[in-house]
Image (cartoon, grey):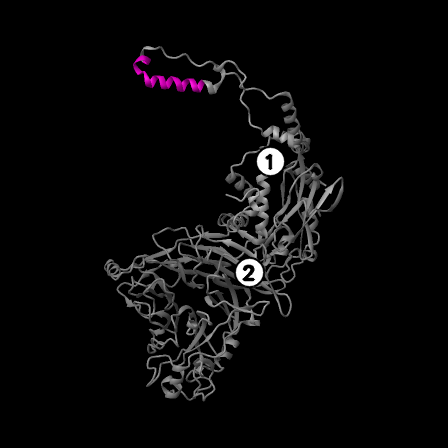
Amino acid sequence: MFCSGKDLVNCDTADCLSQSATICNIFNRRSFQELSYLLFKSQKVTSAVIAMETTQALLLLSLCVYGCHGNPRSTPRVHLSFKELLETKTIRPFSFSFNTSDYRILHMDQDQGRLYLGSREYVVALDMQNINKEPLIIHWPATTQRKGECRLTGKGGQGECANFIRLIEPWNRTHLYACGTGAYRPMCTFINRGWRAEEYLFRLVPGYADSGKGKCPYDPRQESAVALINGNLYAGVHVDFMGTDPAIFRTLGDRPAVRTEQYDSRWLNDPVFVRIQKIPDSAERNDDKLYFFFREKSLDAAGGGSPSVLSRVGRVCLNDDGGQRSLVNKWTTFLKARLVCSVIGSDGVETYFDELRDVFILPTQDERNPVVYAVFSTAGSVFKGSAVCVYSMADIRNVFNGPFSHKHGHNYQWTPYTGKIPYPRPGTCPGGTFTPGVRTTKEFSDEAVNFVRAHPLMYHPIYPLHKRPLVVRTGVDYRFTTIAVDLVDASDGRYEVLFLGTDLGTVQKVIVLPRDLSSTEELILEEVEVFRTTAPVKTMRISSKRQQLYVSSERGLTQVSLHRCDVYGKACSDCCLARDPYCAWDGESCAPFTPATKRRSRRQDIKHGDPLRQCRGFNAKVEKRLRETVQFGVEGSSTFLECQPRSPQASLKWLYQKDGRRKALNRDREVLRTGHGILLKSLSQSDAGLYHCLATENNFKHTVARISLRILDREIVEALTAPDIPDVSLPDHGHNPHHHRHQQQQQQQQHHDHPQQDRRLPPPPPPPQTRPPKLPSQPEVRLINQYCKSYWQQGAGAGNAAGGGGRSQKPKRTNRRHTDETDDQETQDH
C-alpha cells in the first residue's frame, strides 16, 4: 500500500523509504508507462480517482528518482536484463541440465580452445567458441560408502557429503590433474584429454587415485588457491578435517614437500585464499617467487581499534626446500605484507576496504612486472561498499625489501625492526642475484631461519597506484565479487576495460579515463544480468582472442560477448558518446571496432567522446528522424512527460513551444522535474502545446523527445467514465434483471421448503425478455463525439497522408499513445 493523500508526508518514514526503494528497483528496469500500469493495477483505482492517485504516486516517484540516480557516475549507460540480453544474441547460457551445482571455471586452455568446469561430482570440458557445442562430461562422485561415513560424522546437512571439484590443472599436453573434496576425504586423479580438442577424448585414467590432502580442502565451503608449476603443486588450503590448519603447501614433483608453520597465527590466522601466481623477480631463475593473495583475521582485532580482517600478499621462493635444523620441511623464505585499498573523505577520515575478494594478474611485455588488479569490499555490515585497486610489482617488491614489523615497547605495539638483519636477508632466494654462493635454503644460518619464524610480517603496507582506488562503489545494494581485465586497442590509444561481477548476478563493464594528472573519470559502459536466476558471480574468465567472457555461479554458467555495440543507439552521436573501445561508428551503425580495418567513415573518440567533431553530417539526420508523440491530459489533473536520455551523464532541459514560439520551461512551482521526465502538477488549457526535451552531454546537445500535449475538458472525461445508473423508474419488475434474480432465489427457497408440493406444480413460465439497454442521451452523444473527434484527429490526418497514393490502408489497432508519423515521413521524403 502506497502512502496516499495527506499521509504522503506524515506516513512512517521507513514505509515511504521502502516504497521509494521498491519503485527505484522497478524504475531501473522499466519504462514509465510500465511503471504507471503497475501502480494503477496495484491500487485498483477507479477512473474517477486516477488523477489524484497518479499525482501522489508520481510525487513519491520524484522522491526516489535522485536517490536511485543521485550519482550518475555509478549508473551504467546501458542496463540489460537477462531477457533483453538474450534478445541481443550475444549470450549463451549453458543449456545442458544435470543434477549438479556450484559451477566453477577452474582452467582455460587457449591453445586447445577448451574451458574446464568443476561442479558437484562433475568435470566438464566446453568449447570456448560455443559452450553448448558437444560438451564432454565426466561423472566423478564419491563412493556411496564414503558418503555414508561422511554423514555419520555429522556433516551433510547442506549437501557437503559429495565430491566437489576444486582443482583442474594441466599436467602435460595430454593429461590434466584434478582434485575434489571427496565427501570430506580429498581425492585426486588424472584426466586424459587427448592431443587435440578434435579427438573428443575426455575420461578419467582408470585405476589411478591419489590423496588430495594438502591439495584440496575437506570442506567445500572453504576457498582454496592452487598453481601447478614445473610439476610441483602449490596450494593455499586447509589441510585437516576440522578446517583449523591452513597452510601454503607444496606437493608432487621432485622437490620435498614443504608448508607454512603449523598453528602459528603470526604466519596465517584463519586465512581465506584468493589467488596464487608465479612472478619472476629478475632474469635469474633462482629468484623466481610464488605470490599468494589472501585475507585473514587481524591479530589486533580484539583491541577494537584495528580492523577485524586484513588483506595480504605473501611470497615464497620456488626453490625453498626448508631449513636444516629449524623450520624443517617449512618455508624459510615466507614473508607477507598488508594490501591497502582505501579512500580519504573530505573530513580527512580514511575508509578502508579490508576484505580481498578477487585478484586478476594482467600480463605485460615484461613478465617480471604484471599489473595486479584486486577487488575489495568492506568488512562490516553497516557500511556496504566495494572498490578496485591496482598495484605495481615495483611497489610490492619495495615493501618486501623494506623494514620488518616487530612488536616492541610497553604497549607492545607494531614498530619497524631496527636491530641487526641476518645474512642472507630473510626472504632472499638461494642461488639468486644476491646469494650466488648459497645453493639451498638448508645452508641458511640458524639466525636467518629463526628471524623469519619470528618476523614474517613487513612493517609498511602496500598502497595502490596513486594511493587511491581505481573504482569505488558505496551506497549501493551490491558488492563486487570477481574481476577480469582486457586490453583494447582503439583508434586513439590502448585502454583497460574492467569486467566486474557482482553478488546480484550482474557484470559491469567499466572504463577509467584520465581526466588530468590528479583525477580520473570512471564510465560504466554497461551492466548486464547474465543468469536466468539471480545468483552471485562465483568465477569469471576472459578470452581476448575470442572476445568472450565466461561467468559462473552456484547454479550455472554463461558465455557473454565482450561487446554489444548496437545497444548504445542508432546514431553516430550515441556511439561516440558511449566511448566503448570495442565499438566505432562505421557510417551506418555502431559496430565492433577492428584496428586492422581502415575506413574513412569510421568514427571513434574514446578519450574525449566528442560527437561535434566526430559525427559531422550525421547529427542533422537524427534530428529529422525524431518522431513526435501525442499525449493527452485531463484538465485539472496531472500528467507525466517522459524523457529518458541514453546516458545517465546527460543533463536535461525542457522547451515549451506554442504558436511557433519556443522558450525554456521555467514554471518550477507547477512542474516537478525528475531524471526521467517532468510532472505537470495541475493541467489547464494553457499547458497544451509542443514540449521539447533536450539532452546535453560533453557539450553536445540533441533533442531526445518531442511531445505534443493536448488537454481534454474535464467534463467530457467525467461523462465518459461515469458508471451506468440502473433505471429504477420502471413499474414492471419483470423487466428488471435484479428483480428477476430475486424471484428465482425465492422460488429456489420455496422448492427447498416444500419439495413434494413443488413436484405437483407445473414448471414456471420463462422470464419475459428484458428491454434493450438504454441509449445515451443526446448531450452525452455530443460529448462522446467531441472527445473522439479530438482523440482521433491526429491519427486520421496521418492516415490520409499515408493513403494519398491510392493504396488502401489496413486499419491499425487503437492505442492510447500515438506517434505522429506524418511529419517524419515528410521529412524523409524531402
Between 573 and 324, the one nearer to me in the picture? 324
Residue 572 is labelled as: none
Give the mark, 1 or 2, whose residue is nearer the N terminus: 2
**Residue at (35%, 10%) from the top-left corner?**
762
Mark yes or no: residue 440 visible.
no
The percent coordinates of residue 821 (x first, y second) are 66, 38
Between 598 and 604, the one nearer to me in the picture? 604
Q: Which residues are magenta?
A: 740-758
Q: Amino acid at mark 1?
A: Arg
- Check disc 1 and report its element: helix, strand or loop: loop
What secondary structure is the magenta-colored segment mainly?
helix
Q: Is residue 182 left or right of residue 223?
A: left
Q: Is residue 819 above or below residue 106?
A: above
The percent coordinates of residue 541 (x first, y second) are 46, 61
**Residue at (52%, 76%) from the top-left corner?**
395
The percent coordinates of residue 820 (x first, y second) are 66, 38
In the rendered image, residue 49 lying in the magenta stretch gets the answer no
User: Could you tell me if the residues under marks 1 and 2 are in contact, i.e. CB atoms within 8 Å?
Assistant: no
Mark yes or no: residue 161 visible.
yes
Query: Hey, which quadrant is residue 514 in on the image?
Result: bottom right
Separation (CA) of disc 1 from disc 2: 39 Å
- Check disc 2 and report its element: helix, strand or loop: strand
Residue 816 is labelled as: 1
User: Label 2 belongs to which residue?
Assistant: 510
Between 561 and 408, the one nearer to me in the picture? 408
In the rendered image, residue 756 lying in the magenta stretch gets the answer yes
Query: Hey, which quadrant is residue 487 in on the image?
Result: bottom right
**Residue at (59%, 65%) from the top-left corner?**
494
Quadrant (top left/top right/bottom left/bottom right) for the C terminus = top right
Q: Amino acid at mark 2?
A: Val
Query: Hey, which quadrant is residue 469 in on the image?
Result: bottom right
**Residue at (55%, 55%) from the top-left corner?**
526
